Amino acid sequence: MKIGIVGAGAMGLLHAAAFKKSGMDPAVYEKNNETCAAVKKGLTVESGNGKTTFVIDISDEPAILSECGIVFIFVKAYSTSGSMEDIKGQLSGSSIIVTLQNGLGNMEIISGHVGEDRTVYGTTTYGSHKSGPAVLVPGGNGETVLGCRNAASADLAVEILSAAGFTSSVTDDPDRAIWEKAIINAGINPIGALLSISNGRIIELEHASLLQERLIAECVDISGRAGIAFDPGKILEKTRDVCRKTSSNRCSMLQDISSGSGTEIDFINGKIIEKGREAGIPAPYNEAVYLLVKSMETGGGCGKDRPAARTNIS
């Protein structure tokens, strides 16, 4: 089966390389033609064992996905809608779409185009970064959990990911997995971005740690009203454990701010604010970091090429 990937960022290329190494046939759709040109010359993966170069089938035309039975979406959350508009005319009537993206709302956007039975969604703790347009540095081991209303669709996605070396499993509650990751991201990303500090420094600094605690508490109140309950102490400790385990990492939102790219704040803290308003629960700490990150985006020219945000908290 030909496997499609949308987005040639770090996660898209991580999966493309793993699929290729396992003898599969990945095809990558990437709108940026400069990135396409670089990857066409060879994707180099750097690890402790040295460097390996892969020849990846990549194009800036969505027709490259026309023969794919399964397509993995690895664009930023704010590009999900546009990407689905780009590719929907190329998808077969039975192709499965998989999202492991950050934030809330991606599943709803995708299923609006292909239906819930063909939308597989969940989370992953695998990571990587690019040291060049076609140079990938994997971030080590992780775990992927996903689910779907159609069990066969989820099973197929796990089968493919497992064959490529990713530790993967099916969950019967993918919504809970996505909410948990969104809450953890909400308590790490905006603080790291605003203070320009690594994940580990967040829990070392007294006031940053207190802000994290209050962000998490708001998120837990809102998720509970949405029908997904978490123990606030346990998820706070899990968030801090992530900070400890990734202590030297600069979170993706900080990397986006630093590079002048758009952030996913609208789909993390912004969506939590929206859910809170729907439930009549105020979220002043989330609103404060949301407004500050949005100010950094607009004030520094960050995100100038991305679509206007859909979140409205005014």
Image: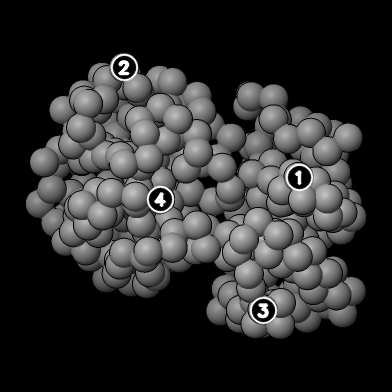
Quadrant assignment, res 61: top left
Q: Can residue 81 be seen?
A: yes
What is the distance, in whole Å, between disc 3 and disc 4 at their CAs?
23 Å
**123 to the left or right of 14:** right
Q: Earlier in the sequence, mark 4 or mark 2?
A: 2
Residue under pointer 4: 121
What is the distance, in whole Å, between disc 1 and disc 3 at their CAs?
22 Å
State whether residue 254 is above or below residue 298: below
Residues 23 and 107: in front is: 107
**168 to the left or right of 76:** left
What is the distance, in whole Å, between disc 2 and disc 1 at their CAs?
34 Å
**127 to the left or right of 69:** right
State whether residue 236 is above or below residue 171: below
Q: Earlier in the sequence, mark 1 or mark 3?
A: 3
Tag 2 secondary structure: helix
The x and y percentages for residue 22 are 14, 56
Q: Earlier in the sequence, mark 3 or mark 4?
A: 4
Q: Which quarter shows the N terminus?
A: top left
Tag 3 secondary structure: loop
Residue under pointer 3: 231
Residues 115 and 27: in front is: 115
Mark 1: amino acid: Glu
In front: mark 2 or mark 3? 3
In front: mark 2 or mark 1? 1
Residue under pointer 2: 89
Q: Residue 278 carries which label?
A: 1
Q: Residue at x 71, y 77 (%)?
A: 232
State whether residue 250 is above or below residue 201: above
